[in-house]
Image (spheres, rainbow, N blue to C red):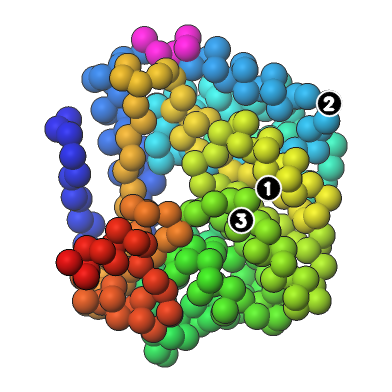
Amino acid sequence: MPSGEIDITIRGPWLHTILFEIPVLAIVNEVYFRHVAGQSNLEEGRARLQKKIAALRAPALADLKIADYGTRRRFSKGWQEEVLRTLSTELGAVPPGQAGAGGLGQLAGTSNVLYAMKLGLIPLGTMAHEYLQAAQALGPRLRDSQTFAFESWAREYRGDLGIALSDVYGMSAFLRDFDLYFCKLFDGARHDSGDPMAWGERLIDHYKALRVDPRTKTLIFSDGLTVPRIIELYERFRGRCLLAFGIGTNLTNDMGDPPDHVPLQIVIKMVRCNGQPVAKLSDTPGKGMCDDEKYLAYLRQVFEIQPFPEQAHAVAG
C-alpha cells in the first residue's frame, strides 16, 4: 500500500451509504496487515493484552469499566473476537440488561453488534460525527444545526442513547449550545478530541454553573485511549461524575512497536449532504474534515471558532 493519503468517496442516498464506514475501514485494515504482518504479531498482541488485563484488575479499579470501540481499525476480525473472548473471561462482562450496574464485570460491552450478539455482550454506541455534520445541511439554519441535531435525536430515541457528541464544532461551541435544557435532557457527553483532562473539567464546571449535579451525568472518553490513560482519567474524575471508556485501536491493533507495526490512521466522514458541503471541526489539529475551504471559513465564523495557530498563519500568509 503506498504511503500518504488515499481518498475513497462513497456516494449515494444517506440510507444506503451510512453503513459503509465500518466494513470498509475494517476490510482495508485486515487486508493491509495480512500482507504486511501476516500472523507473526499475534503472540506479541496476546502478551500486550495480558498486561492490559493485569493493570485493569488492580483492586482499586474494580469499578472501572471499558468498552470495545475497535472494529474500524482492528488487526483482523479473528483477533478482535479473541480479544473480546479473553476480556470477557478474565475481566468479566456486564450482562445484557445490566448496563450501569456495579460489580458485574469490567467489560461493559462492544460497539460491534455481531460480537455483542455472538458473545452475549451489551452493544454500545453513541451519536456519530456524520449525524451532526448532516444537520448542517438538513437543519433550519447553520447556526442552529447543533441544537437541531440534539433535539431531533431526543425526539427519535425518547430517552435512550442519551450521550451527546461534543467535538463536531469543538468544545466551546458545544458548551454554548448545550444549555440547561440539554444538560438535563441528555445523560452525558462523549470526548473525542482535544485534551481529555481539560474537557472533563470544563464539562463538570459547565454542569455546576447550570445547577446540574455532575455526579448524575456520564462522561465518556474515547479518543485514542490506552489503558494507562484510562486509569489516569479514572483516578482524576472518579466520584465527581459517572465514567465510561471506549478503547479502540490500542485494544484491537496493539501488536508491536514501530517500525514493525504501525496502525493505520484512516477515517471516513461525511463531506457533502444534499449537494452542500459539511464539515467536522475538532479540538485536535488534523482531526477535522472538510473539502471546501470557503465553507469551512464560514462555519468557523458562524460558530465563533478560531483556527489553530498554524492554520491562522497559513491563511494570513
Relative to 205, is 312 on the left or the right? left
- From the top left corner, tell me how far across and down residue 203 is, in percent: 66, 64
Q: Judge by depth and name the residue closer to the eye, 53 or 317.
A: 317
Tell me the residue at 19%/44% (across/down). 5
Residue 51 placement: quadrant: top right
Q: How many marks?
A: 3
Q: Judge by depth and name the residue closer to the eye, 108 or 290.
A: 290
- Distance from Cα at disc 3 to Cα at disc 2: 27 Å
Main secondary structure type of the part rendered in magenta: helix
Circle 2 Cα neighbour tier, 10 Å, few/some/many (<14 / 14–19 / ≥20): few
The residue carrying mark 2 is 59
| Label 2 residue SS | helix
The residue carrying mark 3 is 198
Type of the residue with mark 1: Ala
From the image, which quarter does the C terminus lie in?
bottom left
Relative to 25, is 190 on the left or the right? right
| Label 3 residue SS | helix
Tell me the residue at 67%/43% (across/down). 233
Type of the residue with mark 2: Pro
Is any part of residue 152 visible from this angle? no
The residue carrying mark 1 is 244
Relative to 135, is 311 on the left or the right? left
Is any part of residue 18 visible from this angle? yes
Residue 169 placement: quadrant: bottom left
* Magenta residues (range): 40-44
Disc nearer the start of the sequence (3/2): 2
Type of the residue with mark 3: Ala
| Label 1 residue SS | strand
